[in-house]
Image (cartoon, grey):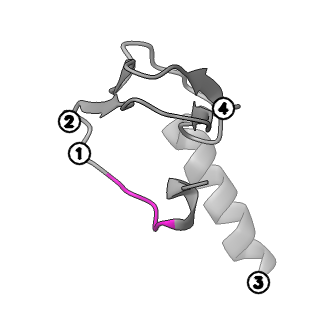
Amino acid sequence: MVSLQALSAMVFAQERKINLCVGQVADEEVFISCDGDAGYSVKAGATAEVRLSDQVVQLITFSKADQFQAIDQKLRGRR
């Protein structure tokens, strides 16, 4: 079994599109996994495109005032 998982991580510019082509495979299954997601089975002859999503997810937001207040409180606590 050949695994690309053993290779170093690859990082590409956000505007890049990566096409992965699966050749004719005899006895082994091929799986693809991106950004830690569960692996997906890919059949022989299939092509997968990896690109930046159109969707944006904002996980945490802070207003600038909240950030400055937090810094001020930490600095005051050091006195």
Q: Residue at point 44% right, 13% down? A: 55
Q: Which residues are magenta?
A: 7-11
Nearer-the-camera pick, 77 or 30? 30
State which quadrant residue 39 falls in: top right
Q: Is residue 11 shown left or right of residue 44?
A: left
Mark-to-mark CA distance, 1 and 4: 23 Å
Mark-to-mark CA distance, 1 and 2: 6 Å
Q: Nearer the viewer, mark 4 or mark 2?
A: 4
Mark-to-mark CA distance, 4 and 2: 22 Å
Residue 39 is tagged as 4
Give the residue type that dot 1 points to: Ala
> Marks 1 and 4: CB-CB under 8 Å?
no
Q: Secondary structure at mark 2?
A: loop
Question: In the image as oriented, which residue stretches furthest toward the left?
Answer: 15
Q: Residue at point 63% right, 33% down? A: 60
In the rendered image, residue 56, in percent from the top left (x then y), is placed at 45, 19
Give the residue type that dot 2 points to: Arg
Quadrant (top left/top right/bottom left/bottom right) for the N terminus? bottom right
Q: Residues within 10 Å of mark 3 (few under 14, many from 20)?
A: few
> Which residue is label 3 attached to?
78
> Which residue is label 1 attached to?
13
Nearer-the-camera pick, 45 or 48? 45
Q: Residue at point 64% right, 52% down? A: 69
Mark-to-mark CA distance, 3 and 2: 46 Å
Question: In the image as oriented, which residue stretches furthest toward the bottom?
Answer: 79
Instruction: Work out whether 28 lies above or below 43.
Output: below
Instruction: Work out whether 60 lies above or below 6.
Output: above
Nearest to N terminus: mark 1 or mark 4: 1
Majority SS type along the magenta span: loop
Mark-to-mark CA distance, 3 and 1: 41 Å
> Which residue is label 2 attached to?
16
